[in-house]
Amino acid sequence: MTKRKWRKLTTRQVHEIREKAAQNHPRKVIAWEYGVSERTVTDVVYGRTYAHVAGALPQPPFHSRVSLADQRAIRTFMEAGGTIRSAVTTFGRCKETIYRYSRNQETS
């Protein structure tokens, strides 16, 4: 295997990045520490890049469809005074999804 000169990270750095990500360090901070982009850190963590480096890789997040019942539950939760942050924790969805279904519009 030839050594590629354009690689920015060493094997040790890849292991460190994956460990920090597993400990829930912010990806923005990790990227700044290693002088790479957040996208690079995400790709390293999920094995899209540096896949040749051994180590446990987490499963990428699975984005399932939001059922009509869940949409109504989110809307009701938000109308009752819930915050976006608490809804994210309660429903296990990203804030963009919560915001989309918290509006009073009927979605299909």
Image: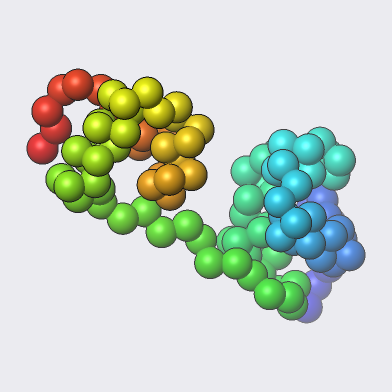
Determine the residue positioned at 19% across, 38% down.
72
Quarter of the image holding residue 27? top right
**How far across and how far down the image is residue 68, in percent?**
15, 45
Quick one: 46 or 7, which is closer to the camera?
Answer: 46
Residue furthest to the front in view is: 80
Q: With respect to residue 105, does 38 lie above or below?
A: below
Residue 45 is left or right of residue 88, and the answer is right
Residue 38 is left or right of residue 91, and the answer is right
- Number of numbered discs overlaid on the protein picture: 0
**How far across and how far down the image is residue 10, in percent?**
87, 61
**How far across and how far down the image is residue 37, in percent?**
70, 39
Determine the residue positioned at 19% across, 21% down.
104
Here the colouring is rainbow
| Residue 17 visible in the current orientation | no
**How far across and how far down the image is residue 5, in percent?**
84, 56
Determine the residue positioned at 31% across, 26% down.
80
Quick one: 50 or 84, which is closer to the camera?
Answer: 84
Quarter of the image holding residue 71? top left
Q: Quadrant of the N terminus?
A: bottom right
Q: With respect to residue 56, does 75 lie above or below?
A: above
Determine the residue positioned at 25% across, 40% down.
73
Residue 93 is left or right of residue 45, and the answer is left
Q: In which quarter of the image is the C terminus?
A: top left
Residue 88 is left or right of residue 48, and the answer is left
Quarter of the image holding residue 26? top right
Quick one: 69 or 47, which is closer to the camera?
Answer: 69
| Residue 48 visible in the current orientation | yes
